[in-house]
Amino acid sequence: MDETVAEYIRRTVLKIPRDEIKMVLQKWGFLSEAQLQTLNFHQMKDSISQEIVQLCEENSADIKQAAVLDIIYNHIYQDKRIWSVYQMKKSGEELEYFDITDFKKKFKRRIRSALKNVTITFKEYEDNAIWIRVAWGTPHKKPNQYKPSYVVYHSQTPYVFISASVLKSNMPLLCQALIVASNYRDIREMELRSHSLNSLKDIVFKTYSQNFQTYTTKPLQEGNVEPENADIRIVQENRSEKERIYRLTQEVFGSGPQPKLEFAQYKLETMFKSDPKMDVLDKKEPFRCLVKFSSPHLLESLKSLAPAGMADAPLSPLLTCIPHKARNYFKIREKKGSVPESFVSP
Amino acid sequence: MAAGRAPARGPTGGEFERRRRAVAAMAEEAQEDGATRTLPSLRRLSRALPFGRTHGRLGTSSSGRPVVSALCSQESVDPEKTAFLLRKSWTLYSVTPLYRFRRARLRDYGRLLSAFIAAEKQKGLAVEVGVELDIKVALSSLAELRGSELDQAALLVQLSSRSQASSRNSEDKPVWLGWFCSVFGDDLSENLPEDFTSLPLFLSHGAESYTALVGSWFQKTFDCCFRRLAISPQNLSWMVAMWAGCKLDRAASAVELIFSVPGLAQPLDISYAIHPEDAKALWDTVQKTPGEITQEEVDVFMDCLYAHFHRHFKIHLSAAKLVKVSTAVASAHCNGIVKILHSQYLPGVLMLLTELAISQIQ
């Protein structure tokens, strides 16, 4: 067995939490059940990885099997990567029968015609997802197995999820191969990124439970304990204000759980509008800012801003449009020759 | 009282005099307020205005020249000699005056501290100090780092390890760095009883276990007291306003404010980064008082930024917590960790931090 293959398998195993190594190897299916029985999982990870490499040696593993192991690892621990959504466009509306063999053949052919030194590996999953791993080389160098690109494609949909290699120069070639293989005309990045591949799928496939009920007249349940002899009018006012915020929040975000995104970014090139009384910065040039929101669960935290009194209700469309527009990267400019209070994003 | 002190201070440059006048003016004002305390910085505290009015120091002087650059040229800080202090994360502490500290005994102190560290390690009290068994301690003075001649020269403590395997010719590996300093900290030093040395600001870089060891040795030896120096959101806004207004020759990095929003279903952090030219343009129109910066100006600056943000996102940043500011001059986190990025403004930043340390001590 090639030494680089052995080392690659060893390093991949080292990335897996010890308790889960066996499960990953079972999914891989390259080592027999009998071989797995011989492994001692109660020792240091380093020793486990050595034993595994030994067994792979016996089965004479090559880079193809090692690459499959890597896909399995990334499928299980997909939240470790950052995924970007790409959308493809057709010339017509015709639906074609999707042939996976044909797809693979065309994809490989397109990439190999430009670059011989590549490792291309496919793995199909039950949910119609095809995972593609491409390790890139150069005309004179073998593929770098440690910096591959990962592509997740759902046939019959125009969406592709890519976790790009740091070797960015190969991106155009990868995109070309994708449209050639899937019979599309064009591909573009959607400016939607997240660690959570599943949430991205939810957003673009619109499967998250966003209900657009215009009126949810359900009164507030939580914590509505009013002091007994408080002014009834104030209590009433507070309650109706709370209900208004609650209703507006439900309208915009729906009542279900939000898809998981970790960040949103806005490049603002808008005018600085100051209070004339303040007599500050009166410039005709845009005020350049970059605003980033980050949270373990961005949409849930945005949803709770107005109820927590940290924001107006309804929240700015710039924030609430994230799931509808299916993007979390924006460039905001002043709308030309119109109401000063509105913005447009290209 | 203030007028009586001025001549005793000896020959100093114009900028320094200007600053003294500012302090003197403030002292007078404070007396009008009816304050009866004697230390100027206490008056400052009583005004609930952390950096006081004297912060004209960092703004532009009446001649339109940044005061800090004037400070630099006056004290002739050699950028080479202080370069190692830049672009490192420093954890801040305030330190009460050292008792019976003798500058001439630095070598002895180094030996004693080294022995102390070795003994503590033997006891096994120091956690995670690891394999570096032989720790070399060097104490030295950094005369470049002070504001006026009333300030003590900064004191540098360097810990380095000699790996056992490669004995003699291998170089010592630096493992920890700390320094005491006072830049225009004379509010504290001039009222000290004899035998006390005022170096109110302590900055450390490296494993906390070493900070704890060095700190406890100093505490034991000089009867002083270390406390972590946190920076309040209000002080952070002062810093970002002042630093946003600093003139920088080269392409500067953005003026960034980082907020955390409390009380949500999920934690939320907001980074608000402003192009340095635009932030400076805004500050320059806000900052109107010649030679000084006022609380009101800082408030207006922040309110303007909040209003611009609200116009886009409908979020009230004023209700969020400002946790970190970063500019081309320096960055500061509310938990008391700073990074100084620009040698030209090193004295200016240290002056602010000295002042914070002094108000914590008092």
Image (tube, rainbow, N blue to C red):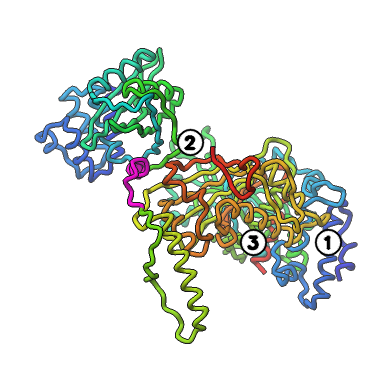
Task: Name the residue beneath numbered marker 3.
Answer: B234
Instruction: Determine the secondary structure under disc 1.
Output: helix
Same-chain status of marks 2 and 1: yes
| Residue A283: % across, % down | 73, 44
User: Can residue B112 be seen in this snapshot?
Assistant: no
- Left or right, B72 with respect to B94, comes to right
In x, y percent, where is residue B326? Answer: 61, 48
Q: Are marks 1 and 3 in contact (CB under 8 Å)?
A: no
In the structure shown, which secondary structural element does the residue marked by tag 2 occupy? loop
In the picture of the structure, the residue carrying the numbered disc 1 is: B22
Label 3: state its secondary structure: helix
The relative height of residue A110 versus residue A83 in the rendered view (above or below) is: above
Q: Earlier in the sequence, mark 2 or mark 1?
A: 1
Could you say which is closer to the camera, residue A207 or residue A303?
A: A207
Q: Is residue A120 visible?
A: yes
Q: Judge left or right: residue B306 versus residue B152.
A: left
Q: Are marks 3 and 2 on the same chain?
A: yes
Q: Earlier in the sequence, mark 1 or mark 3?
A: 1
Instruction: Give the residue pinned by disc 2.
Output: B167
Q: Looking at the picture, which amino acid does disc 2 mark? A: Ser
Q: Chain of mark 3?
A: B
Q: What's the residue type where badge 3 is placed?
A: Gln
Q: Look at discs 3 and 2 and give the one toward the viewer.
A: 3
Chain letter belonging to callout 2: B
Look at the image and say whether residue B128 sits in the magenta stretch: no
